[in-house]
Image (tube, helix red, strand yellow):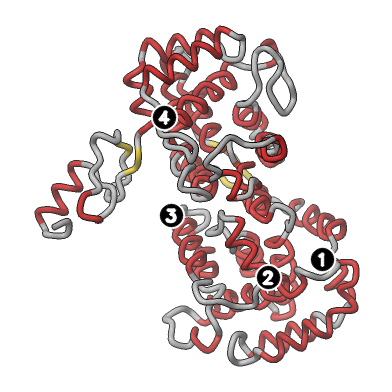
C-alpha cells in the first residue's frame, strides 16, 4: 500500500510532537527554524538548501524525549553532555531516506565552531549545523524573558552571541545574525501568534512524496521511538501495541490495508505522552487527581497532531480514541459505542494488554491469565469490545508474544522475552545474534 504524503506537513507534525516535551515551554524548534531560515536567506542559500536548513532546525531536538533534558536545553547556554541528544537524533533520522540528509545537521548542532574544524564534514554542513546551534542558543537566551518584551532584551542577547564569536560560532554567522537581528521583524515574529502565521505560510508550499508501506511504517517508527524513549517504563510500548493491533486485525478478518493502518495507528497512539512530565510517568504509585488530569491530555494531543496531516484523518481516530469506552465514560470526547470503529476498539484493547504485559513503576508485568481477567472485566462493564477481547482469549499465547516482544539489538527482530538474552552486559540479543557474538568472542 503506497501512501502520498506532504513531507513538510509531516516535518511540522513531528515538530508539534517535539513541542510537547517542553510541556509549557513550547515552539522552541519552530522559533529556531524561523531564525535559522532568516540567517540562511541572508547567506544567500538556494531554496533546496534553505529547505534542508529549515527542516533540520524544526527537528534538531528529536533526540530529546525527557522534560528534564529539555529544561537544560532551554535554560543553559552550554553544558557537558549536550552532544548526547545530537547523536541520538542524528541516528534516528539517518535510518529513513526522507530524513537522512537532515541527520548531519542535527548531529553537529551543539558542536562548537572551534571544534568543528577537526571534524570531517563538508563545509556547508558545518556552517548549516552551526547556524542551528547559534539560533538555538539565541532562543535559549530568550527563555526566561517575556516574549512581548524581546525588543528590550535584544541588545543583551546580541552581545552574548558576539562574545562567543570564533569559539562557539563561526565569525561569518555571527556577522549575519547581527545584521538580520537589527530588524524588529526578527524579534516580533518570535511571539506565538506571529510565529503561527509564519508557519502557516510555510506549509502552503507542499513537498509531496509517495512512500511505500515499509517506508511509511519506518517514518511512523521515528515518532514512536521518540515517545517510547521518554521513560524506561514506556520503552517499546508503541511497538508492542502496533504489533498486537495488526495481529488482532488479521484475526478479526480485516483486509491487509486496514491491518497496515492499525499498525501505524499503534505506533502513533501515544504521541501526546511527551507532554506528560517524567516524574508523573515514572511515579511508583497511583496518580493523584492533578496528575491524572495531566495524563488525560495525551490522547487529545495525539489527535490534534495527527489530524492536521493530509490523509491521516482515519489513522488519527484509530490512534487517539484508545481511551474512549463503549459506555461513553472514557476520554477525551466521551464517545459511545456507535461512534467507535472496530479499529479504534482494537487499539484500545491492544493498548491495555501491552501496558499490562510490561513492567511499570508501580507494578511488575502481569501474567497472561491475569491480563485476561482484567480485559474480561472491562468488557463485561461495557468498556471494551467483547468480540475483540474474545479473540485475544482464543489466541492468548500469540497475543502475549506480540505485546511482550522486545527488539534484538543485533538484528532488530522482535522476539519474546524468553528468547532474548542479556547475559554479559552486551545488550539484548536473540538466539541467532547471541550465537554469532559468542562465536566471535564479542559476548564472552
Measure the C-alpha gap from mark 3 to mark 1: 32 Å
Which quadrant would the C terminus be assigned to in this image?
Answer: bottom left
**Of label 1 and label 2, which has the lower sequence position?**
2
Label 1, label 2: how many angstroms apart (C-alpha)? 17 Å
Q: Residue at x 62, y 67 (%)?
A: 72
Q: In which quarter of the image is residue 253?
A: top left
Q: Is mark 4 on a helix, strand or loop?
A: loop
Q: Earlier in the sequence, mark 3 or mark 1?
A: 3
Q: Is residue 143 above or below residue 383?
A: below
* 269, 23: nearer the viewer: 23
- Label 4 neighbourhood size at 10 Å, few (<14), some (14-19), many (20+)? many
Q: Name the residue under label 1.
A: 190
Counting the numbered discs, the total is 4
What is the x, y in percent for residue 174?
69, 87
Of labels 3 and 1, the one closer to you? 1
Q: Are marks 3 and 2 in contact (CB under 8 Å)?
A: no
Residue 411, given in percent of the width and then of the height, sits at: 28, 47
Amino acid at each position: 500500500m503506497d501512501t502520498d504524503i506532504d513531507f513538510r506537513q509531516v516535518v511540522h507534525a513531528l515538530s508539534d510532537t517535539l513541542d510537547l516535551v517542553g510541556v509549557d515551554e513550547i515552539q522552541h524548534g519552530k522559533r529556531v527554524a524561523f531564525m535559522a531560515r532568516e540567517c540562511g536567506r541572508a547567506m544567500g542559500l538556494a531554496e533546496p538548501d534553505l529547505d534542508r536548513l529549515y527542516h533540520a532546525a524544526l527537528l534538531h531536538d528529536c533526540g530529546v524525549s525527557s522534560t528534564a533534558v529539555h529544561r537544560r536545553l532551554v535554560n543553559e547556554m552550554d553544558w557537558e553532555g549536550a552532544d548526547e541528544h545530537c547523536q541520538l537524533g542524528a541516528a534516528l533520522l539517518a535510518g529513513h531516506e526522507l530524513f537522512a540528509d537532515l541527520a548531519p545537521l542535527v548531529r553537529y548542532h551543539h558542536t562548537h565552531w572551534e571544534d568543528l574544524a577537526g571534524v570531517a564534514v563538508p563545509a556547508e554542513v558545518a556552517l548549516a549545523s552551526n547556524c542551528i546551534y547559534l539560533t538555538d542558543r539565541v532562543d535559549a537566551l530568550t527563555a526566561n524573558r517575556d516574549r512581548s518584551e524581546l525588543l528590550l532584551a535584544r541588545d543583551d542577547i546580541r552581545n552574548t552571541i558576539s562574545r562567543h564569536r570564533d569559539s562557539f560560532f563561526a565569525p561569518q554567522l555571527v556577522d549575519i545574525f547581527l545584521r538580520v537581528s537589527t530588524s524588529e521583524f526578527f524579534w516580533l515574529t518570535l511571539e506565538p501568534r506571529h510565529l503561527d502565521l509564519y508557519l502557516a505560510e510555510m506549509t502552503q508550499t507542499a513537498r509531496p512524496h509517495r512512500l511505500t508501506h515499509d517506508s511509511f511504517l519506518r517514518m511512523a517508527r521515528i515518532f514512536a521511538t521518540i515517545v517510547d524513549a521518554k521513560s524506561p517504563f514506556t520503552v517499546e510500548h508503541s511497538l508492542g501495541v502496533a504489533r498486537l493491533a495488526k495481529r488482532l486485525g488479521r484475526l478479526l478478518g480485516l483486509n491487509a490495508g486496514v491491518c497496515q493502518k492499525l499498525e501505524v495507528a499503534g505506533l502513533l497512539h501515544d504521541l501526546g505522552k511527551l507532554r506528560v512530565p517524567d516524574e508523573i510517568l515514572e511515579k511508583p504509585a497511583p496518580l493523584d487527581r492533578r496528575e491524572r488530569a495531566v495524563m488525560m491530555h495525551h490522547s487529545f494531543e495525539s489527535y490534534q497532531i495527527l489530524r492536521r496531516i493530509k490523509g491521516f484523518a482515519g489513522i488519527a481516530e484509530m490512534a487517539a480514541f484508545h481511551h474512549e469506552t463503549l459506555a461513553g465514560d472514557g476520554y477525551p470526547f466521551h464517545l459511545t459505542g456507535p461512534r467507535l470503529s472496530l479499529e479504534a476498539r482494537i487499539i484500545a484493547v491492544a493498548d491495555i494488554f501491552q501496558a499490562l504485559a510490561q513492567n511499570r513503576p508501580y507494578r511488575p508485568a502481569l501474567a497472561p491469565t491475569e491480563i485476561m481477567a482484567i480485559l474480561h472485566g472491562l468488557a463485561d462493564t461495557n468498556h471494551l469490545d467483547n468480540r475483540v477481547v474474545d479473540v485475544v482469549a482464543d489466541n492468548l499465547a500469540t497475543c502475549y508474544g506480540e505485546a511482550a516482544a522486545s527488539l534484538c539489538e543485533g538484528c532488530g527482530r522482535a522476539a519474546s522475552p524468553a528468547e532474548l538474552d542479556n547475559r554479559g552486559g552486551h545488550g539484548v540479543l536473540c538466539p541467532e545474534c547471541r550465537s554469532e557474538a559468542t562465536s566471535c568472542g564479542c559476548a564472552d
